[in-house]
Image: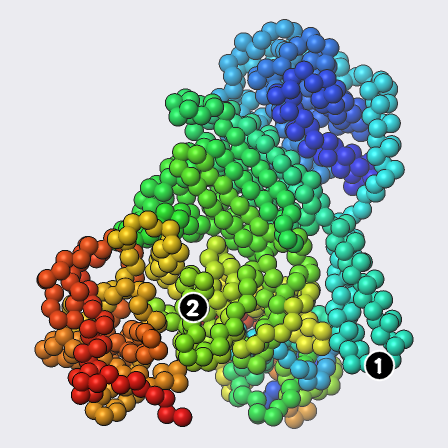
Amino acid sequence: MSAQYSTFLVDGFLFGVDVRRVQEVIRHQDMTPVPLASPVVRGLINLRGQIVTALDLRVRLGLGAHAADARPMNVVVRTDEGAVALLVDEIGDVLTVDPAAWERAPATLPTTARALIPGAYKLDGRLLMQLDVDRVLETDAAVAA
Amino acid sequence: MDDLLRDFLTESNENLEQLDRDIVALERRPDDPTLIHGIFRTIHTIKGTCGFIGLDRLEAVAHAAESVLGALREDELSISDALITDVLAAVDVIKLILETLERTEQEPAGDDSVLIARLETWLRGERAHAPEPPAAPVVDRKVTPIHAMAAVPAPAANAATSASPARAAEPASPESPADATGEHRASVADSTLRVHVNLLDKLMTLVGELVLDRNRLIQLTAGQDDASVTSAVQHLNRVTSDLQEAVMKTRMQPIGGAWTKLPRLVRDLAQMSGKKLQLEMHGAETELDRQILQAITDPLTHMVRNSADHGVEMPDVRRAAGKPAHGTIRLNAYHEGGHVIIEVRDDGAGISVERVRKKAIDRGLLTRETADTLSDAQILRYIFEPGFSTAEKLTNVSGRGVGMDVVRTNIERIGGQVDLQSTPGQGAAVRVKIPLTLAIIPALVVLAAGQRYAIPQVNLLELVRVSGIAGEPGVEMLHGAPVYRLRGRLLPLVFLDGVLAARDTTEATGRVLNIVVLQAEGRAFGLVVDGLSDSEEIVVKPLGRHLQGIAAFAGTTIMGDGSVALILDVPGLARQARVVDDEHSREAAEQLQARGATTSANVRTMLVVQIGTRDRAAVELARVSRLEEFRPSNIEYSSGRAVAQYRGDIIPLIRLSEWFGHGTVEDLTSRDRFPVVVHSHHGRTVGLIVDRILDIVEQEVTVHRGRGGAGLLGTASIQGRVTDLLDLDRIIGESLAESEGGEVVELEAVA
C-alpha cells in the first residue's frame, strides 16, 4: 500500500511527513521569540487566532544553522494538543511513494537526525527521508528551568 | 446511557449534595421541620425513581433510610449523633452506588445488609446495642463505608434481608410530598435552564476570539477619520464588552458550590478526633468563574482540614485556656477590586512557630543558623515549602500527600495568592486571593529587550520611575543584590532583561529605571523593565507543550496588532531570579519601618562593616546615603587623592583600612569590586571604602567610650560582637584636611 508524503527541504536534505499529519503549509511568518526556551523553539506564530509554537527543524535535526537572512517556511502539523509549526527551508510536493523503495536511513546523517528518521525512500536520483513527527515533537522545553 | 438514567443521576447528585448539608444542619437544628421534610422528600424521591428504573440495591438502602427519616418526621424518633451517623452512612452508600452507575451503568455488587439492619434497629426502638463502628476512615468518595460497617457484628441480619424485599415491592406512591416537590420544582424550572458546560466553554472561547478581533479593530481604526467606521467600531466595542460580561456571568457560580461538602467533612472530623467543631460560612453567594471554582475546591478542603486537624484544640484544652469548648472554623468570601478573597480562619491554637522551625530544620529546608536569624513570619512561610507537613503523623484526614505547597501551587496556577497568619493561642487564618476569571484578564504591557510582555494586573502593586539624578534616592546594593528603597522598605529588584537572557544584570546606578512593583508569594519585589506600554484586557492562552517548563511565563496572548506576546508568571519570575535573600532584605525593611515605632532612645539602626581583615565597625544607617559597589577602574586620582566620579559629582574616596593604619593593606586592584559607603552631608559627598559590608542591625547600642582610638566614638557590642563605632565627622574632616593642607575645600563639579 503506498503512502503519501508532504515533502520539504532542510539543509539540502529532502524530508517527508505523512500527509495526514499535515494541517497546512504556509510561508514565513513573523515570530515572537521565546527567551529561556530550548534553541529548538524559534518562536510563536499567530495562526488565525491560534498561537502555534514554531520548531526549528535545522536545530532539531542537528543540521547547520539558517543563514541570517533566511525566511524559513512553515509545515504545520496536527497534534493532540493543537498545531505545531516546523520550520523548513523550502516546501516540496506531495509525493506518493512505493513501500518497496524503503530502506534504512543513511549513515551520513548526524546522530540526532538518525533518531528521528526511521528510514528513507529511494526516488529518482534522490532520497526522501521519512521523518517521525511525534519523535520530532518530543523535545525538551526549557533550557533554564 | 439512556436519558432516564442520565437524568436520574444528574438530579440525584444535586439532591445528595443538598442532603449532606441539610442533614448536618439538622444536627444543629433538630426541631426544624422544614429540614426534616426536605431530607425525607429527597430520599423518598430517590427511592421512588430507582424502584422505577429497577435499581434494587439502591432502592433497598434508600428505603431503609427513608423509613428512619419518616419515623423522625413523625416524631417517633429523636435526633442523636448515632442516628445521624447512620443516616449519613446510608447517604454515602447511595452516593457510591450512583457513582458506579454513572461509570458503568450498573449497580455495584455489594451487601448492605449490615447497614440496613442498623437502620432498622432504630425503627424497632432498639437503640443500637451493637457497638459503635470503629473509628472509620473519613467517609470519602474513594472509601467504601460498607467495608467499615462489615467489621461490626450485625445484631439482626436475618430480619433485615427478609424485610427489604417485602418493602421493595411497594410501588412509588404518589403521596402529597411528591406532589409538593413537583410543584416546587416547576416554579424553579421556569426561570432556569440546564446547559451543558461544554457549550458554555465554547461560548467563552468564541467571546475570547471576539475580544481579540475587537482589540485588533480598535488598533486598526485608531487613526481613522471616517466617522461611520469609527462609530461602528465603537458600537462593536460596547457590544463586545457587554457580551463578554454576560458570558462570564454564565460561568459564574456561587462559591457555596465549593463549600457543599465541608459541613459534612467538619462533622466527620469532629467525630473522629473527639474535638468539637463548628463551621461558619459567610459569603457563600460570592460568585466566581466555574473553572476557578473547580481549582480551589481541593485547596479549600485541605485548609479546612488543617484547621480542624492541627488548629483547633481538644475541648478540655480549650476550656483550660478559657475558650469555648467548640472550636469555630470560619469561611469568609467576598469580592474586592476584581478579585475574590476567601479566608479560612480558626480560633484554635495558632500555628506553632517552634514546630514549624523544627520541622523545617529536620526536613533539611533550613539550617539552624539561618533559622536563628529569621522572624516568626519568615519561619511560618516554610509551611509552603515542598516536602513540609506539620502533622506529627499523617492522619488519614489531612494526609494524602497534599501539602500547603500544593495548595499554593494550585492557587498560583490560576493567578491567585495565598497568605498565612497566625496568633499563638488565638488561631490562624489562611487568606486566598483569586482573580474573577481566568480567560480574560487585565494586564500591564511592558517592554524588555525589545519585546513586549504582559503582566497580570492581579500581581501589580504600583509603578515607580527612578530618575537617577544625583541626590535622589536610587538603587542600592545590599549583599551584592540590587534593592530600591521605597518609602522606607527595601524592595529587591529583578531586571527583566537579565532574567530573560539568563544572566544577572546588576548595572543599576545612574540610569532611568522603570520599576514595576509586583507581589508574589506574599513578598513584594520590583521588576525593572525597559519601558511601559498600556494596560489592556488580554485573552489568556495556555503555554504550548514545548514551553510549559519555563518558570518565567504563565501563558501567551495575541496583542491588538496581531503579534504574539508572552505573559509573565510573576511568582515564577520571583523564584527564578532568586529575589534577594529574604532574611536580610525583610529584616532590614522591617527594621527601617519599625524605627518610627521604637520608644527606646538607645535602639538604633546600624550598618556593620568589616575593615581590614577582621575588624568590625559600625555607623548609624541614617548617616549612610547609599551603599554602592565600585570597581578598581572607578578610582581616579586628583592631587594625589583617590576620587571617583559619582552621579555627576567627583567625590573623595577614603579607604578606612588605610585610615586606621592597618598594616598591610590589600591592593584594591586585586579585587574586581569593593563596597563603598556613601555619605552625604551638607552638599558634600564622600565615599568610604570598606572591606566588606556585613549587616544592617537594629538594636540597643550602648557606647563604651574611651576604648577606641582616633576616628572612633567608642565601641559597642553589636550582634554580640565587639564593634568599633565610627566617628564619621572626624574621619572625613581629618582625611580631607590632611590632603588639602588644612583647608576644607568644596569640590566643584567641572562644568
In terms of image quadrants, where is residue B652?
Answer: bottom left
Query: Which residue in the rendered view is the most extreme toward the front?
Result: B743
Dot 1 falls on a residue whose secondary structure is: loop
Q: Looking at the picture, tell me which residue is in the foreground, B370 or B648.
A: B648
Q: Compared to A12, does B286 lie above or below?
A: above
Q: Chain of mark 1?
A: B
**Which residue is found at the position 25% from the left and 65% from the top?**
B619
B406 left or right of B355? right
Which disc, if any, is residue A102? none
Q: Looking at the picture, tell me which residue is in the foreground, A32 or B111.
A: A32
Q: Compared to B138, does B452 lie above or below?
A: below
The residue beneath circle 1 is B225
In the rendered image, residue B118, in percent from the top left (x then y), is placed at: 61, 15
The residue beneath circle 2 is B484
Q: Amino acid at mark 2?
A: Tyr
In the rendered image, residue B207, in percent from the top left (x then y), is placed at: 77, 61
